[in-house]
């Protein structure tokens, strides 16, 4: 009897694990483009290349298989470059725009694509070869395409205390200070932008109802923006609010609408904007890009 119980538990676990993995993938923000995709949740671009073979080439010799593999890799690189050029930098610019304004940047992007990682190569039964390549949106790529106005913000240096002890406040002042409520310290920001048709971007902005920027390139340190992106993206509110990026006490606000031709910038209420501006501690988590945006 015990053997049957243990066997039932093992079968149940095996059934649950694939479903759990599928749910995680289903919650990722993925934008499909041509023969590839941009995974904004993981921060990667990916594309597949194919070298199809006629029926008479089923039994390929090793040399022919090697040539087919190289052809599939070249096709994957072309497709990956196409996907990479479609990556939105902000609400008005995609990477492809650099091909018109800056040949040097586009040459460097092409070089990064050629050095992309092969994550899968498969020989199908009909002789077709498929190769999948991927590249990170972070690191060197982000350093290259992020707006130059995103600067490195140095940490604030503390001023050494004076040797003279300050006078002690009177009991009346202490009593008033104790009664004054302290503002809550938030460790990150979660923007609920579902239903707004928001399009993810590498440098999106959050603005108030008056058009004033609440979060954007002026608030972040380039170091963090390059390492992990200015904002993380998710489809599930619970997953976003519990994401390590925003740690244990994020402020959650509701997006009202989008701004900009690319629909990447989000408008929040003036009241929520005031909460973000009301305490200096908030500047610290914004500097470190501790922001999650939840989209459809």
Image (spheres, grey):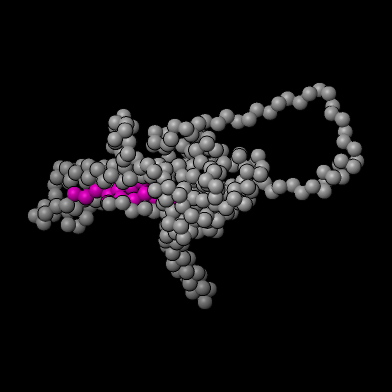
The percent position of residue 58, horizontal first and vertical second, equals 13, 54
The percent position of residue 181, horizontal first and vertical second, equals 77, 49
In the displayed structure image, the side of residue 170 where residue 119 appears, left or right: left
Q: Quadrant of residue 148?
A: top left
The residue located at (66%, 44%) in the rendering is: 278
Tell me, yes or no, if residue 8 can be seen here. Answer: yes
The residue located at (34%, 40%) in the rendering is: 95
In the displayed structure image, the side of residue 197 where residue 83 appears, left or right: left
Q: Nearer the viewer, residue 261 or 133?
A: 261
Point out the residue furthest to the left here. Answer: 56
The residue located at (8%, 55%) in the rendering is: 56
In the displayed structure image, the side of residue 72 where residue 268 appears, left or right: right
Point out the residue furthest to the right here. Answer: 171
The percent position of residue 210, horizontal first and vertical second, equals 55, 47
Q: Nearer the viewer, residue 222 or 35?
A: 222
The residue located at (81%, 22%) in the rendering is: 163
Helix, strand or loop for the magenta stretch, by majority: strand
Q: Is residue 42 magenta?
A: yes
The percent position of residue 96, horizontal first and vertical second, equals 31, 40
> Total number of numbered labels?
0
Q: Quadrant of residue 63?
A: top left
Tell me, yes or no, if residue 187 can be seen here. Answer: no
Q: Which residues lie in the magenta part?
A: 35-51
Quarter holding the C terminus is bottom left
Q: Is residue 290 magenta?
A: no
């Amino acid at each position: 009897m015990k053997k049957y119980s243990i066997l039932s538990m093992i079968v149940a676990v095996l059934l649950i694990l694939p479903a759990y993995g599928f749910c995680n993938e289903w919650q990722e923000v993925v934008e499909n483009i041509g023969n590839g995709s941009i995974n904004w949740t993981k921060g990667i671009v990916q594309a597949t290349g194919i070298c199809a073979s006629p029926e008479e080439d089923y039994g390929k010799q090793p040399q022919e298989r090697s040539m087919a593999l190289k052809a599939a890799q070249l096709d994957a690189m072309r497709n990956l470059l196409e996907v990479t050029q479609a990556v939105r930098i902000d609400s008005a610019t995609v990477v492809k725009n650099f091909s018109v304004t800056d040949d040097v940047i586009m040459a460097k992007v092409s070089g990064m694509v050629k050095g992309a990682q092969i994550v899968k190569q498969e020989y199908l039964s009909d002789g077709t070869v498929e190769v999948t390549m991927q590249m990170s949106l972070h690191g060197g790529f982000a350093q290259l395409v992020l707006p130059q106005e995103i600067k490195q913000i140095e940490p604030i240096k503390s001023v050494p205390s004076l040797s003279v002890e300050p006078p002690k406040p009177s009991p009346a002042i202490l009593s008033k200070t104790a009664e004054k409520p302290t503002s809550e310290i938030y460790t990150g920001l979660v923007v609920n932008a579902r239903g707004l048709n928001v399009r993810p971007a590498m440098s999106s902005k959050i603005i108030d109802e008056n058009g004033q920027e609440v979060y954007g390139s002026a608030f972040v340190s380039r170091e963090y923006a390059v390492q992990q992106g200015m904002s993380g993206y998710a489809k599930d509110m619970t997953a976003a609010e519990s994401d390590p990026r925003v740690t244990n006490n994020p402020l959650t606000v509701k997006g009202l609408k989008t701004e900009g031709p690319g629909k990447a910038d989000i408008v929040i209420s003036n009241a929520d904007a005031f909460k973000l501006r009301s305490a200096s501690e908030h500047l610290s988590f914004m500097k470190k890009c501790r922001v999650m945006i939840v989209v459809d």
